[in-house]
Image (cartoon, grey):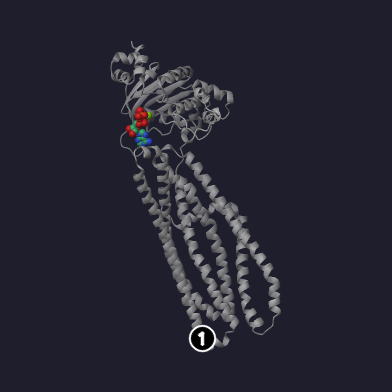
Amino acid sequence: MNPNLPTQSLFKRFSKYLKDFKAAFAVAIVGMIGYASLDAWIFSKLQPIIDESLGSQNYEFLKLAAFFVVPIFILRGVFNFMGTYTLAWIGNRVVMNMRQQLFEKYIHLPVSFHDTHSSGKLISKVIYDTEQVSAAASKALLTLVREGAFVIGLLVVMFYNSWQLSLVFLLIGPVVAVIVSVVSKRFRIVSKNIQKAMGNLTSSVEQALKGHKVVLMFGGQDIEKNRFLEKNNHNRQQNMKLLVTQILSVSSIQVLASIALAFVLYISSLPTMAEQLTPGIFTTVVVCMTMLLKPLKQLTTVNSEFQRGMAACMSIFEVLDEDIERDTGDKRVDKLKGKIELDDVSFTYPDTAKPALQNISFDVDAGKTCALVGRSGSGKSTISSLLTRFYDNQGGEIRLDGLAIDKIKLADLRKQFALVSQNVVLFNDTIANNIAYASENATREEVIEAAKIAHVEEFVSMLPDGYETIIGENGSKLSGGQRQRVAIARAILLDAPILILDEATSALDAESERLIQDALQKLQRNRTSIVIAHRLSTIENADNILVIEQGKILEQGSHTELMREDGAYAQLHKLGFSEGETEQVDVDGKLP
Ligand code: ATP
Ligand code: MG
């Protein structure tokens, strides 16, 4: 979205959120105008009370007033409720809708968006920016309509009493307008800065919390403390700037009003005017003018609220305008057999120069296992990300069962994969729910069955709450290996035709790895598998092994073939052996 977009088009877009609330708005406006008119009407009674009642010692009018005053204030309360409650109701609805929209957007945006946007800032948009918009929706309108109507009402009363004195007040009107417009520009700039500052603030809190252990370990408290202090202070400064602008604008308007009042007092003292003026008229005009100050002041701050809301709207619309994952496919598929073909595939990550993959071609027949090995950063995980279309390949074609993957409906495509990725992601929920995350219809028995295969059962049976144990944020109450096993169980339960195991067993000891390896081999029998592993012992049985080096396929073949070739794989294999004693013993027996 264009950051210099005029307020009108922002507001126009924002008003779409209000269009469902027309009836509520009508109620609110009736309430607000009723409230303001009643107030103005009360002031219009000042003159008769002073001149006709007190001045001529006729107390009938006062008696009448005594009877009416309570019902009038009850009515005023009703109007107030109509206006304030209804507006708050609309405002909260708008906040809720925007939050929902943002959240839904976040979960549909492509991986590349989240690569480049800090989650702290995105959270701040949902929490803080939407609130700012609500302030524009309800508070601004409340002041605008109610105080606006009150100002008009007071002006009417004043003019009715003495148009000459009231004219003075009109002279300062244009000056007030100029001040308001200057102030509003400044407000919008400062408001935008505040939003950014809030985003930065949440980001640093989030980072420090997520990386709490790293902070503790490396003694990074001072660095983090100062970094936060800087952002915290910046946020405070921006808020103070907003406040200063607000105070200055309020004060200058009050000074202007006092000038008008000075004129009124002076004119009243002139002999021609003094003849026309009764005590009632004079009091009414002066009281009305003084009363005008408060709504006028509020009318200028309303603009700050409004500008703040619009700045927040902009920050929200920016995200809402982002393209969600492109679902180019319209082909619905149910369950594929799982033949994978990569045909001359190349890929470069957004905003990077070096291609992550170049001219990758290989096939995996349905039911076969393909292993990817290679140095760290060679591009193995990238291949898995392209298969699941977390990113779109820029060159070549990827096919599943002969269908180009970008022709398959995205949701259907992803259903074909069970992915255990390098970074296991678990939810702060029970173990059972984590295992069943993608399989809504799984029965309890099926969940436990999968858990048994993945050797989750072993540690779950020792937990007091068993499968109902809540595992903490991202499974922080589990060990690394336990987390991996839960993730494997989830993939097993999914029963998808293609299994991708990206370093799925890296956090397991040799013993549990072998157990899981057995289980996985059973699973792999009737499904296509792509196994990425650093420990070469785990992939020796693969039908095909690809050695990836700097985004290219260096060699491929079965374990025996590659060993015979005595190339890069054999080299890696030799290195792999020297890593751990247990592994050495384990693999030694299998050496040719
Ligand atoms: P490892 O064995 O360490 O997991 P890998 O073979 O899986 O390594 P990839 O994750 O595929 O390596 O990364 C390949 C290259 O792409 C690396 O040079 C990496 O820096 C780069 N890369 C990975 N993810 C991104 C990203 N989101 N944005 C930009 N570059 C990336
Ligand atoms: Mg990787």
The image quadrant where one finds the C terminus is top left
Residue 252 percent location from the top left of the image: 44, 70
Q: How many numbered tags mark residues here?
A: 1
Quarter of the image where one finds residue 246: bottom left
Instruction: Classify residue 60 as left or right of residue 201.
Output: right
Quarter of the image where one finds residue 340: top left
| Front in this rendered view, residue 125 or 472 | 472
Q: Amino acid at mark 1?
A: Ser
Residue 582 percent location from the top left of the image: 36, 17
Residue 152 percent location from the top left of the image: 56, 70
Quarter of the rendered structure image containing ligand 1: top left
Q: Is label 1's Cβ within 8 Å of ligand 1?
A: no
Instruction: Classify residue 152 as left or right of residue 6.
Output: right
Query: Are there few (<14), some (14-19), or many (20+) residues within 10 Å of tag 1?
Result: few
- Observer able to see residue 117: no
Residue 256 percent location from the top left of the image: 46, 73
**Looking at the picture, does residue 293 appear above or below residue 233?**
below
| Front in this rendered view, residue 368 or 236 | 236
Q: Secondary structure at mark 1?
A: helix
**Looking at the picture, does residue 134 appear above or below residue 451?**
below
- Observer able to see residue 10: yes
Residue at screen point 51% across, 86% down:
269
| Front in this rendered view, residue 303 or 467 | 467
Q: What residue would you read off at disc 1?
A: 269
